[in-house]
């Protein structure tokens, strides 16, 4: 009987630990998407500097989600955000917007 009780307790403990990791991933993902939306909004207006600011914040949240155990699509999104940042630094709002849109669609899947 002790073995069954111990097994149940360990199982419940493992469940709650996994739930916490999932919650962190979800929170970071939501923030990354929100910042990407802002970056896209400014990119469509041709404002590379504002796009750059939001893309950097989005990338930070996306990396945090990846560190919290997010899927491979989030890792791909980080790669597109890196490219978006590079284009925004060269004042190429169109290309930066395109990469940010790709990153956002990957984060939303």
Image (cartoon, rainbow, N blue to C red):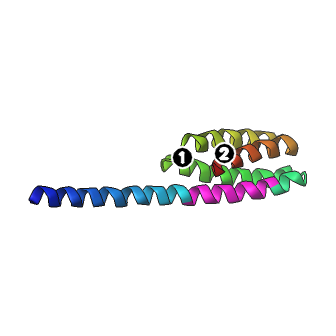
Residue drawn at (72%, 51%) of the image: 55
- How far apart are the alpha carbons under marks 1 and 2? 13 Å
- SS for dot 2: helix
The image quarter containing residue 90 is: top right
Residue drawn at point x = 12 percent, y = 55 percent: 3
Task: Provide the residue designation for mark 2.
Answer: 106
Q: Is residue 102 visible?
A: yes
The answer to whether residue 38 is magenta is yes
Q: Residue at x 75, y 46 (%)?
A: 100
Judge from the rendering whether residue 84 lies leftward or rightward of residue 70; answer left or right.
right
Q: Quadrant of residue 4?
A: bottom left
Foreground: 2 or 41?
Answer: 2
Q: Which residue range is magenta in the image? A: 27-40
- Could you classify mark 2 by the number of other residues whose Cα lies within 10 Å: few (under 14), some (14-19), or many (20 or more)? some
Give the residue at mark 1.
66
Pick the quarter of the image with the N terminus.
bottom left
Left or right side of 97 for 17: left
Residue 47 visible to the viewer: no
Q: Sequence-wise, which precedes: disc 1 or disc 2? A: 1
Quadrant of the image occupied by residue 7: bottom left
Does residue 13 belong to the magenta stretch?
no
Residue 104, position as x, y percentages in the image:
70, 49
What residue lies at 72% left-to-right and 54% top-to-bottom? 36
The rendered magenta stretch, by its main secondary structure, is classed as helix
Percent x, y for residue 68?
A: 48, 50
Q: Residues within 10 Å of mark 1 (few under 14, many from 20)?
A: many
């Amino acid at each position: 009987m002790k073995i069954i009780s111990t097994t149940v307790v360990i199982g419940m403990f493992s469940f709650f630990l996994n739930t916490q990791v999932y919650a962190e991933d979800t929170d970071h993902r939501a923030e990354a998407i929100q910042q990407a939306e802002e970056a896209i909004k400014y990119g469509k207006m041709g404002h590379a500097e504002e796009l750059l600011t939001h893309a950097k914040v989005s990338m930070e949240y996306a990396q945090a989600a990846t560190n919290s155990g997010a899927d491979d699509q989030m890792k791909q999104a980080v790669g597109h955000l890196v490219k978006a940042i590079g284009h925004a630094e060269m004042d190429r709002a169109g290309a930066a917007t395109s990469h940010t849109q790709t990153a956002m669609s990957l984060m939303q899947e």
